[in-house]
Image (tube, rainbow, N blue to C red):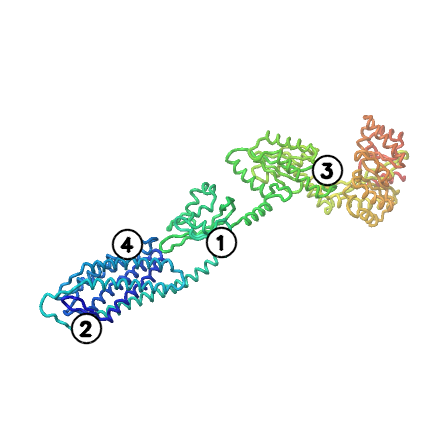
């Protein structure tokens, strides 16, 4: 290809083709690198940008230099090494600028001008490196055209780079990259060859010398540059291929990781250093109600209620605001409340982790909805700390609150009150109406108790019908007022179902620190005061006094002694004679138990029998008395003394035990006593279950045993049982007999009982006869038998033997 210049010029076609091929390959490599640059962040982006700039810049420069070397002039040409090196700089800068531009969201024409300027500068600086015996002149029109082509080439390159970047995820991308690379390579080559066409070479003078060696050297240099450039491009292609493989594996791992995240039921949220949400999984969408599109770009704090953020303004922010050197929340699990899109709050468990990616800190949070767990914990707490029937605090919760109250009282100097409350006759209600009605009654009682005290007071159920009320910051007057309020409240009937019930409380009170300085002592002393109320008639309240401990201590010792007394033979039976008033002869004896306690001495039956009834020990003690009385009576008979009837008191608890008739039968058989010589004295309280009582009494009568009603007139007012029960006699209570001559009412009662017994065909016995005047009255009224101190106090068996012996004589 020749031009009209003073010096002839021609091109090496192979080098021309090589000069066009290199920018095409370099453009392809640059487009590939551009995609990696766009996907990378931080340091990796800078590395890929530098590699791309070198690849593209050196590709453009190589194309330019090889194309210059492809030109053959009729004069020797050499190149200034320094200027050649300087010409590389504009190409590298232009390439770097281009690759930096494609990372921007939009493309600007002004940036294309800078890139074009770099390419033009590279070309014409490179032309200045030519050293020869000729000068170079430029055609202005073609020079301007080459600059315009450089601008168009730059604009085209940028446009194609943006286009490929946007289509990075599209299939068959390699076709688009190939086409774009060809267009870019040809555009750059066109600029160069237009610029070369604008140049004309004029000889200074002398003969132009053609040097084959120079031509050969230039060709070798061009091939060397081309091969070197191809090696560089091969390395670029290899690195991008390897990176793509790694990227492919990374994408596969990311897809698997993403599938795991999406399948998780927990909310997994990724946020940047400003806690702006970057990733939002399906679990988070289901939990909070925001779609991924709605959540991404918003702050993580939107999932936390404002009230919690305000309450924890200092404590919460450090857990969410990332500080790479010191992140308090990292590796910790927090329990707080989450906020759904619809404004509802729910308990959550938040686990935080922090990591760095390309120098930037990121926060991952795993959030779990713990609503069900909290419900379960609440239920467990209720089971542990609340009474399941009434919902009141139980013993455990009362102990916790009492400990807290004691600690506060030590600081404030205030008093604490303990109110120990037990329901009177609750066992009777429970036994007669059933446990279901008993439970319903306890629920109503708990409601009334809560209404009688203040909000800061704790009403606790200890079990059964026992309640304890904790009164922090109280006084003697305040406790008195509340106890009176409770008594007044329970004076009204309680409606359970459709049935009215009356239940009264016995209340014991103790005060801290006067009545104890610890939990156990306060409760024990209130319990002691409550028992004193029970002993003094129930349905009242009483404050603890130190003297009460003596009563409780004695009661406890008696209870322990009762359990051991039978085995240790501490019990004995004394006998009080029963006298036929007309004949004046002993016709029977009443067996009366006596207890000689090893430490406390002789214990009155009036003291230990009620305790034996309460504890249930009356059953083994009563059975022992029955057997001992039968044995003693048989012994008297065996000694030749006149036979008599022996009376044994039977408590209602003994009488109601299953198999009572068999117990009596066994005692008679073991001792050999005939049934007609045994009298069982029954109390009127057995009419509580008259059907059961009649059945047992008929069994006893069939055996031939004598039956009497003891303490007649002091129990139930109904007299219908006199007609129903197969009894033989009535015993007039000693309280009537003792005041017979002083109280006209007692005299009238005794007279009435004797007449009623005569009319019903029953024998009548008067207890407590102490004077001849009383005996004379009974004789005139035709009372059959009498017993009392007028005849004899209860005496040991030997004394009865003497009396019976004297009677024979």
The N terminus: image quadrant: bottom left
Q: Which mark is residue 216?
A: 2
Q: CA distance from mark 1 to mark 3?
A: 58 Å
Which residue is denoted by mark 4 in the rendering? 111
Mark 1 or 3, closer to the camera: 1
Element type where label 1 sits in the image:
helix
Q: Residues within 10 Å of mark 1 (few under 14, many from 20)?
A: many
Which residue is denoted by mark 3 in the rendering? 499
Mark 2 or 3, closer to the camera: 2
Q: Position of residue 50 (x, y in %)?
A: 29, 59
Q: Position of residue 372 (x, y in %)?
A: 55, 49
Q: Position of residue 577 (x, y in %)?
A: 84, 37
Element type where label 4 sits in the image:
helix
Q: CA distance from mark 4 to mark 3?
A: 97 Å
Q: Residues within 10 Å of mark 4 (few under 14, many from 20)?
A: some
Using the rendered view, name the quadrant where residue 489 is placed. top right
Using the rendered view, name the quadrant where residue 518 is placed. top right
> Would you place residue 612 above or below residue 483 in this image?
below
The mark nearer the N terminus, 1 or 3, is 1
Which residue is denoted by mark 1 in the rendering? 282
The mark nearer the N terminus, 1 or 2, is 2
């Amino acid at each position: 290809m020749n031009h009209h210049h003073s010096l002839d010029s021609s091109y090496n076609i192979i080098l021309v083709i090589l000069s066009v091929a290199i920018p095409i390959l370099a453009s392809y490599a640059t487009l590939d690198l551009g995609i990696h640059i766009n996907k990378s962040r931080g340091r990796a982006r800078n590395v890929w940008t530098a590699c791309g700039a070198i690849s593209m810049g050196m590709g453009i420069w190589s194309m330019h230099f090889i194309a210059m070397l492809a030109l053959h002039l009729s004069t020797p040409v050499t190149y200034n090494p320094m200027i050649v090196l300087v010409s590389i700089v504009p190409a590298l800068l232009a390439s770097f600028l281009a690759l930096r531009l494609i990372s921007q969201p939009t493309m600007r024409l002004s940036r294309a001008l800078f890139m074009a300027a770099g390419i033009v500068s590279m070309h014409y600086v490179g032309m200045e490196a030519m050293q020869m015996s000729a000068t170079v002149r430029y055609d202005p029109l073609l020079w301007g055209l080459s600059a315009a082509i450089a601008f168009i080439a730059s604009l085209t390159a940028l446009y194609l780079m943006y286009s490929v970047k946007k289509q990075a995820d599209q299939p068959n991308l390699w076709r688009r990259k190939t086409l774009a690379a060809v267009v870019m390579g040809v555009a750059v080559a066109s600029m160069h060859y237009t610029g070369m066409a604008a140049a004309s070479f004029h000889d200074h003078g002398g003969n132009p010398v053609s040097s084959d060696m120079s031509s050969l050297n230039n060709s070798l240099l061009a091939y060397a540059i081309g091969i070197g450039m191809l090696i560089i491009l091969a390395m670029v292609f290899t690195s991008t291929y390897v990176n793509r493989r790694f990227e492919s594996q990374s994408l596969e791992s990311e897809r698997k990781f993403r599938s795991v995240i999406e399948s998780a039921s927990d909310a997994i949220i990724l946020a940047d250093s400003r806690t702006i949400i970057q990733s939002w999984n399906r679990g988070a969408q289901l939990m909070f109600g925001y779609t991924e599109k709605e959540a991404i770009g918003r702050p993580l704090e939107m999932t936390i209620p404002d009230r919690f953020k305000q309450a924890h303004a200092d404590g919460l922010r450090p857990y969410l605001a990332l500080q790479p050197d010191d992140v308090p929340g990292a590796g910790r699990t927090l329990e707080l409340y989450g906020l759904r899109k619809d404004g509802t709050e729910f308990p959550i468990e938040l686990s935080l982790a922090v990591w760095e990616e390309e120098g930037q800190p990121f926060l991952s949070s795993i959030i779990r909805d713990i609503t069900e767990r909290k419900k379960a914990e609440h239920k467990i707490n209720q089971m542990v700390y609340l009474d399941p029937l009434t919902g009141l605090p139980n013993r455990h919760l009362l102990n916790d609150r009492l400990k807290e109250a004691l600690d506060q009282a030590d600081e404030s100097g205030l008093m604490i009150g303990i109110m120990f409350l037990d329901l009177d006759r609750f066992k009777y209600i429970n036994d007669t109406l059933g446990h279901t009605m008993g439970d319903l009654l306890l629920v109503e009682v708990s409601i009334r108790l809560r209404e009688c005290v203040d909000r800061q007071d704790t009403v606790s159920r200890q079990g059964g019908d026992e309640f304890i009320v904790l009164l922090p910051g109280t006084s003697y007057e305040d406790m008195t007022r509340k106890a009176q309020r409770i008594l007044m409240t329970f004076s009204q009937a309680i409606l359970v179902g459709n049935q009215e019930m009356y239940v009264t409380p016995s209340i014991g009170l103790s005060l801290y620190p006067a009545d104890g300085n610890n939990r156990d002592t306060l409760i024990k002393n209130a319990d002691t005061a409550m028992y004193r109320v029970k002993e003094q008639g129930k349905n009242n309240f009483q404050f603890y006094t130190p003297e009460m401990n003596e009563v409780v201590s004695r009661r406890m010792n008696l209870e322990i002694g009762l359990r051991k007394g039978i085995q240790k033979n501490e019990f004995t039976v004394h006998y009080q004679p029963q006298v036929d008033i007309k004949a004046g002869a002993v016709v029977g004896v009443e067996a009366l138990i006596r207890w000689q306690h090893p430490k406390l001495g002789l214990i009155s039956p009036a003291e230990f029998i009620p305790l034996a009834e309460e504890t249930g020990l009356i059953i083994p003690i009563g059975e022992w008395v029955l057997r001992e009385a039968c044995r003693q009576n048989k012994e008297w008979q065996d000694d030749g003394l006149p036979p008599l009837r022996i009376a044994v008191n039977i408590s209602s608890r003994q009488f109601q035990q299953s198999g009572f008739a068999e117990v009596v039968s066994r005692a008679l058989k073991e001792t050999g006593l005939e049934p007609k010589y045994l009298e069982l004295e029954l109390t009127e309280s057995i009419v509580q279950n008259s059907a059961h009582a009649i059945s047992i009494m008929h069994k006893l009568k069939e055996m031939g045993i004598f039956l009497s009603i003891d303490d007649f007139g002091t129990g139930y007012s109904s007299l219908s049982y006199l007609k129903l029960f197969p009894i033989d006699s009535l015993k007039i209570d000693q309280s009537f007999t003792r005041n017979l001559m002083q109280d006209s009412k007692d005299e009238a009662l005794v007279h009435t009982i004797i007449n009623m017994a005569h009319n019903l065909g029953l024998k009548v016995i008067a207890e407590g006869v102490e004077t001849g005047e009383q005996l004379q009255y009974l004789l005139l009224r035709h009372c059959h038998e009498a017993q009392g101190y007028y005849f004899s106090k209860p005496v040991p068996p030997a004394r009865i033997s003497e009396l019976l012996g004297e009677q024979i004589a």
